Image (spheres, grey):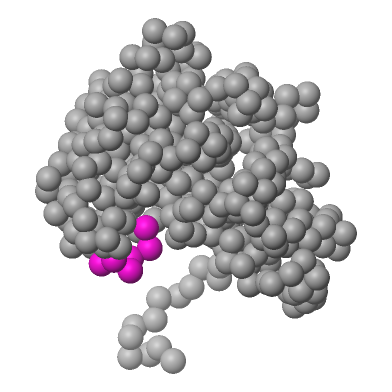
Amino acid sequence: MSDKKKTGGLAGVSAGETQLCTVGKEGAGLTYRGYDIYDLADRASFEEVAYLLLYGKLPNSRELAAYIKTLKSLRGLPPQLKQVLELVPGDTHPMDVLRSAVSLLGNFEPEGDFSNQSRVADRLLACLPSMLLYWHRFHTDGKRINVETGDDSVSGHFLHLLHDSKPSELHRKSLDTTLILYAEHEFNASTFAARVITGTLSDMHSAVTGAIGALRGPLHGGANEAAMELIQKFKSPDEAARGVRGMLARKERIMGFGHRVYTVSDPRNAVNKKMSKMLSEEAGDTHLYAISEAIEKVMWDEKKLFANADFFAASVYHFIGIPTYLFTPIFVCSRISGWAAHIMEQRANNKLIRPAADYIGPPLQKWQPIEKRA
Ligand code: COA
């Protein structure tokens, strides 16, 4: 294989330094600012993790209480933004709604100079669920909901707005854990897109708008929705195994499997899979979890491909009553913490990101007047 082929898609190429995250590093695995993902998933709340990423350290209890209070105070939406959300068609993909909503927020609340960047990050973290679910509830129930709930957590706020009632602690905690797992992942495509935009000294809303566009695709964040659609196609584990073997024979891609950096497993999968099993038992599910496991087995047996974070996240969300088309937007509500931390890190030591390309087009051509062209 030529060197060019090997570096296609910048695979294995280091494109800069970061203090935020290691992915699959020998002896470290997945860490956020040096903390192991399993410790964070087990013991932290999403707000603690967001604070760690954005402010550089785990908060003490006073700092955490103040941070929760701040986030709660930033959930409201400008009335003009609500009006626009009402005008956006109800059948728009919610990722497109979020992409437009973040861009519009940048019109109503421009960042200006970068002295308020932490405040802009907190504002986005606090109000992304409000934007998403204001639009969703207006178009599904015809209701203009109050987005300023008294829930302490982002996960509680999200589920409360979605279901119009406080969630059970099991469901809230499950969503919270997936938010922790999705929060940060080094130079993934959407984060890198945000850093490229930031590198031109553009504003945070522009960088996040671009990142949402990158996350939307099924090779990145969109995989969790595609995984759910696949799982739901099958009625039994046997049918799923046969179906997936057939897809592989036809060289189709199975979303929720494989990874650019990890080679044998995605550490986030173990946590999601355990939660999916527990929630499946709680829901009295008789087939969805078993079908997921059957697909996982075929993918490993046939292709040595492992489930990534998106595969079992899909059934976790399904079991807590979240419609499939909101799965990737949840990823946004979490990854905003990582994106904003990277945007601030990029600004702290900025250099325009502008790589070179190897030209493979035609040699120098002689100019042809239009009447002489073939
Ligand atoms: N299903 C089927 N085959 C897959 C696959 C999948 N999910 N992921 C990789 N492969 C195969 C490719 O077809 C390719 O086979 P080939 O060499 O015979 O052509 C080989 O594995 C390498 O894949 P490639 O796309 O070149 O690797 P990559 O590092 O660029 O891909 C992903 C990484 C994530 C884009 C890829 O694994 C994928 O498309 N996964 C599904 C989407 C997904 O879950 N995305 C979320 C990632 S967290």
x%, y% of residue 335?
Answer: 47, 39
- Considering every residue shown, the one lying at the far right of the view is 301
Front-lying residue, 206 or 46: 46
x%, y% of residue 49?
Answer: 50, 24
Q: In the rendered image, which quarter is residue 208 located in?
A: top left
Quadrant of the rendering where the N terminus is positioned: bottom right
Q: In this view, does 11 lie to the left or right of 333?
A: right
Span shown in magenta: 89-94
Q: Which residue is drawn at 29% across and 66% down?
A: 90
Q: Residue at x 54, y 59 (%)?
A: 225
Q: Does the magenta stretch include residue 91?
A: yes
Residue 87 visible in this rendered orientation of the protein: yes
Front-lying residue, 197 or 303: 303
Query: Image height check: is 96 above or below 103?
Result: below
Q: Which residue is drawn at 52% across and 49% down?
A: 320
Q: In the rendered image, which quarter is residue 181 located in?
A: top right
Does the magenta stretch mainly form a helix, a strand or a loop?
A: loop
Q: Residue at x 72, y 51 (%)?
A: 307
Quadrant of the rendering where the C terminus is positioned: bottom left
x%, y% of residue 123?
Answer: 29, 31
Residue 308 visible in this rendered orientation of the protein: no
Q: Does the magenta stretch include residue 228?
A: no
